[in-house]
Amino acid sequence: MLTLHLLRHAKSDWSDETLADHDRPLNRRGKRARKAIARHVAGWPVDLVVCSTATRAQATAEPIVETLGCPLRRERALYGADVDELFDVVRALPTDVATVMIVGHNPGIEDFSATLCGRTVRYPTAALGTVELPNERWTDVAPMSGTLVAHVTPAELEGSD
């Protein structure tokens, strides 16, 4: 069995209109949300975090990777990825990892989750879904092959410390 955690990046800062979309940092709310998610996943067995190269996605992933103590791989293809591109990234995951977290963007993350699980669930900023896959190899991951077993938003975690 494989496990895939799907995390949408935290809330970004739009105050500097001169920045390219790819280069936008997190705002104050986003920084709080990434910490809440990092606390939530503390102790989880995650073999690898694969993250979009966008500044806000990397900033979301940093405390999570630090908390989990797992490797981080930056993947340019995740920036603006659609469902097919997300399947390509997942199917190319290393064979020696069984639990992976992807940090990406909407609408890709939400659409990918729906395609994998046959169930639409909203992914507001910093929402995290966990999908269990009955596959033994990432190359076999296909539409409708997963089960969404958990989904949480930072708002649901407030006050849960």
Image: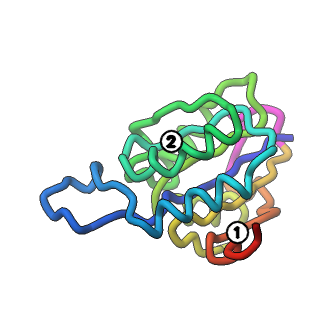
> Horizontal and vertical percent for residue 29?
46, 69
Q: Is residue 103 above or below residue 71?
A: below
Q: Which mark is residue 14?
A: none
Residue at 51% of width from left, 41% of height from top?
Answer: 51
> Horizontal and vertical percent for residue 74?
47, 34
Q: Amino acid at mark 1?
A: Val
Residue at 83% of width from left, 34% of height from top?
Answer: 136
Q: Secondary structure at mark 1?
A: strand
Which residue is at the front of the view, 17 or 79? Answer: 17
Residue at 39% of width from left, 48% of height from top?
Answer: 79
Instruction: Quadrant for residue 16, please give it.
Output: bottom left
Task: Say how many tags the image has.
Answer: 2
**Does residue 53 appear anywhere in the picture?**
yes
Residue 92 magenta: no
Query: Quadrant location of the N terminus?
Result: top right
Instruction: Quadrant for residue 71, please give it.
Output: top right
Give the residue furthest to the left.
18
Span highlighted in magenta in the image: 135-142
Residue at 69% of width from left, 48% of height from top?
Answer: 142
First of labels 2, 1 by sequence position:
2
Residue 139 magenta: yes
Q: Is residue 160 above or below residue 85?
A: below
> Horizontal and vertical percent for residue 159?
72, 76
Q: Is residue 59 left or right of residue 88?
A: left
Q: Secondary structure at mark 2?
A: strand
> Horizontal and vertical percent for residue 134?
85, 46
Which residue is at the front of the view, 5 or 154? Answer: 154
Residue occupied by mark 2? 51
Residue occupied by mark 1? 152
Q: In terms of secondary structure, what is the magenta stretch mainly?
A: loop
Q: Amino acid at mark 2?
A: Cys
